Image (cartoon, grey):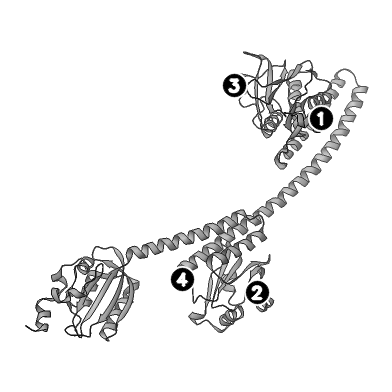
Amino acid sequence: MSIVDSVSTRPEKTFQILDEPGVGILVLDQDMGVTWVNAYAREILAASEDEVLGSGIHQVLDTHLMPLVDEGEGTRELFTAMGAGDEVSCLDLRVQDARGEERRYVYSSRRLEQDPFAGMWVLRIRDVTSRKTSERLLSANRQLQVLNQIMGVSASSLSLDELLEASLSRTLDLLDFNLGLTYLLNPERTLALARYHHAVPEAFLARNREIKVHHWPWNFVFVAGKPRYLELSSEPGTLEEEILASLGVATLACIPILAESVVVGALLLGSRERDGLSDEERRLLEAIGNEIGSGVLRSMLHKRLEAAHRETNLYLDIMTHDIKNAENVASLYCDLLLDMLEGDAAAYAKKLKESVRKSTGILQNVSTIRRIHQEPPELAPVHLGQVIRAGIDRTPDADVSFTGSSAEVWADDLLSEVFTNLVGNAVQFGGPGVGITIRVEDDPEEVDTVVVSVEDTGPGIPDEMKETVFDRFNRGYGEGLGLYIVGTLVTRYGGRVWVEDRVCGHPDQGASFRFALSEVVRTGTDDEME
């Protein structure tokens, strides 16, 4: 029996030497008919040996491995090359297999020259689906890491200049570009002004520190808000080629910086080595442009907020100053009226003065709240007894009992407002004859802590109101701001505040406001230094 006869009658024996593990092998005759197929190829095709042998390779692949719509040209290239006697080293195609699943295969063909296989073809099919998926996952993970770093820069930047400089530097480092610029549009949106640049030739900067945004090709980026990619490998126009040459790069990415879909600037990144940018790289750059745009928007809003804050404070300062002056004048006239009038008229004048006093207190509370929110707490030792005595002196009409205290606590100069508001509330609700007692004691539960009690003989506070009496604008007891300030300041000092009955179980016999503060503990060394 001849070798040719052997090939015809026992192909599985003859072509065994062509088999490779993990690779689909199909041997084709000169007419492109399938002469032999290995087991792995049959698994890929999801077909039996009888369904494949003797069939043309065109029919086999079209039936069992249907290329996706955008990959059909690749299959035709394979058939055309083999028909012309040309080998194909690597053809990467996405196909839909017989099970309806999308897969990724790499085809390669080789023509056999030695007998007994002369004139025949070997078609190899490798399933690279899992490898391509892994590569895509790795690429996506890297893109997320890059984007997260840019987001970190955007979130941590304290100013617009810091944001633009840091984001450009980080993008260049992470994505291996050689040079870059950031532009921002002027308020009239007619010019793009260069804000930061790295490794950009001086000749380019001299001509392009200001770009007229309606001129080609920049209008595509600054007006239409679309990314523009200039690449020498894609045969750019004359003007684009001049831009690349003036920068000394082979590829230039022009990415719009968008703040809520509005163009505010652009990021230009150039590479000397890259022939072009992949779709993944382009999507990443566009995401970076959007993230920088979000940072620019935050910075702009922050500037507007600061300006509005300054303006509001200015108005409030003017109002407070002028109202205080008017109240001082009104209070003087009230005193004159009280000296001149008697009977009901004098009583009306006294009520008028009390109303002026309340107005002054409200202004003082507003000023205190402003300081609480604007100034961070800078706690220092404060002599508690001196603060309490000063508060008592400011309310000479109140009947306040205080035996004194040598304790020092961690607080600031706003501590006096706590006593001003507590004593003021007691006088307001208890009347002129209300008795007020202030005590300072060691906290029985916590070391290095004192508890201050401000008790009054007024109408007291019902149990259902005790939990909410320190809430803002609670009008069940006080003017709505006073006790809120008390609670806020005590919390500011790291303490706690609460209210009890002066006589346990008898809320109608007066209230006891209590708050705990950290005590300053003096060591022997501290005393010597003083």
Q: Residue furthest left?
A: 1
Mark 3 = which residue?
Answer: 464
Q: Amino acid at mark 4?
A: Ser
Mark 4 = which residue?
Answer: 278
Dot 2 or dot 4: first in sequence order is: 2
Q: CA distance from mark 3 to mark 2?
A: 69 Å
Image position of 87 (left or right of 207): left
Q: Position of residue 229 (x, y in %)?
A: 52, 74
Residue mark closest to the camera, 1 vs 3 = 3
Q: Residues within 10 Å of mark 2 (few under 14, many from 20)?
A: some
Residue mark closest to the camera, 3 vs 4 = 4
Q: Amino acid at mark 3?
A: Glu
Mark 1 = which residue?
Answer: 356
Mark 2 = which residue?
Answer: 212
Image position of 34 (left or right of 246): left
Q: Is residue 341 visible?
A: yes
C-beta proximity under 8 Å, tags 3 and 4: no
Q: Residues within 10 Å of mark 3 (few under 14, many from 20)?
A: few
Q: Position of residue 461 (x, y in %)?
A: 65, 19
